[in-house]
């Protein structure tokens, strides 16, 4: 059971990208994704070049959101793509054959389709309404256990997860989670990750 961290520029100032990446990796994140939805591609490339060595130093896989070519350019471990970002095989090719391609999924059908396509892991959510994905309806907790029955890939539950509701998410069947805003806005990122990991490994 693990926590996948997203370094989201909606919550992190540009000048804090490297220090926050260091805290996320040092704290024990299982993977780190760079997500910068509103930034120009050239700036995302620049940030990816800065973050990759931080992840490498800690042995944390580095994932680039949405931009396979940037993943290829910086030698990232993987790329994460949404439902509208093309096929998994094409994304892998554009990413220079990187070893990890993740897919966002929002239903059981999409989760199963991602397996058929050849994804290496899936994000499953949003479980709760979240400002990170405005306008996307929450799918709730009801399908988490069924998703794990149907899908053999690693499933990272995502969407409005906090330390307060994490126990409920785990009780619903989650094995791995992605935490974004609650983590990035915490006063002590490494301590937050340690707390989350202890909740993920607690028997319920």
Image: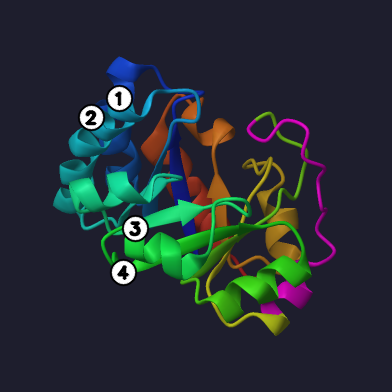
Name the residue: 25% across, 37% down: 22
| One can see residue 84 in this view | yes
In the depicted structure, whether residue 153 falls above or below residue 134:
below
- In percent of width and height, residue 24 lies at 35, 41
Name the residue: 27% across, 34% down: 45
- In percent of width and height, residue 115 lies at 58, 77
Q: Which portion, as a residue range, is magenta?
A: 132-148
Q: Which residue is mark 4?
A: 99
Point out the tag, 4 or 2, that comes first from the N-terminus: 2
**On the rendered structure, is 51 left or right of 181?**
left
Secondary structure category for the residue under label 2: helix
Mark 1 nearby-residue class (10 Å; few <14, some 14–19, many ≥20): few
Name the residue: 71% across, 66% down: 110
Check contact, mark 4 vs mark 1: CB within 8 A.
no
> What quarter of the picture does the C terminus occupy?
bottom right
Point out the tag, 1 or 3, that comes first from the N-terminus: 1
Foreground of the two, 132 or 99: 99
Q: Which residue is mark 2?
A: 46
The tag on residue 2 is none
Of badges 3 and 4, nearer the viewer stands 3
Point out the tag, 4 or 1, that comes first from the N-terminus: 1
| One can see residue 204 in this view | no
Secondary structure category for the residue under label 4: loop
Of badges 3 and 2, nearer the viewer stands 3
Query: Which picture quadrant has residue 108?
Result: bottom right
Mark 2 nearby-residue class (10 Å; few <14, some 14–19, many ≥20): few
Q: CA distance from mark 1 to mark 3?
A: 19 Å
Q: Which residue is mark 1?
A: 43
The tag on residue 94 is 3
Mark 3 nearby-residue class (10 Å; few <14, some 14–19, many ≥20): some
Q: Is residue 87 within the magenta segment?
A: no
Query: Which picture quadrant has residue 41?
Result: top left
């Amino acid at each position: 059971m693990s926590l996948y961290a997203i370094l989201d520029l909606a919550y992190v100032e540009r000048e804090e990208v490297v220090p926050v990446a260091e805290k996320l990796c040092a704290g024990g994140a299982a993977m780190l994704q760079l997500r910068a939805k509103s930034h120009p591609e050239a700036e995302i490339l620049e940030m990816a070049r800065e973050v990759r060595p931080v992840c490498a130093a800690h042995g944390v896989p580095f994932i680039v959101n949405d931009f396979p070519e940037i993943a290829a350019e910086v030698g990232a471990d993987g790329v994460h793509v949404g439902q509208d970002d093309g096929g998994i095989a094409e994304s892998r090719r554009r990413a220079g054959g990187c070893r990890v391609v993740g897919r966002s999924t929002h239903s059981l059908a999409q989760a199963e389709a991602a397996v058929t396509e050849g994804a290496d892991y899936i994000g499953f959510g949003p479980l709760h309404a979240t400002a990170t994905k405005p306008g996307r309806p929450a799918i709730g907790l009801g399908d988490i256990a069924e998703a794990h029955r149907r899908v053999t890939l690693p499933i990272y539950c995502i969407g409005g997860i906090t330390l307060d509701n994490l126990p409920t998410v785990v009780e619903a069947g989650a094995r791995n989670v992605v935490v974004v805003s609650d983590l990035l806005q915490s006063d002590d990122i490494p301590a937050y990750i340690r707390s989350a990991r202890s909740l993920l490994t607690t028997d319920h």
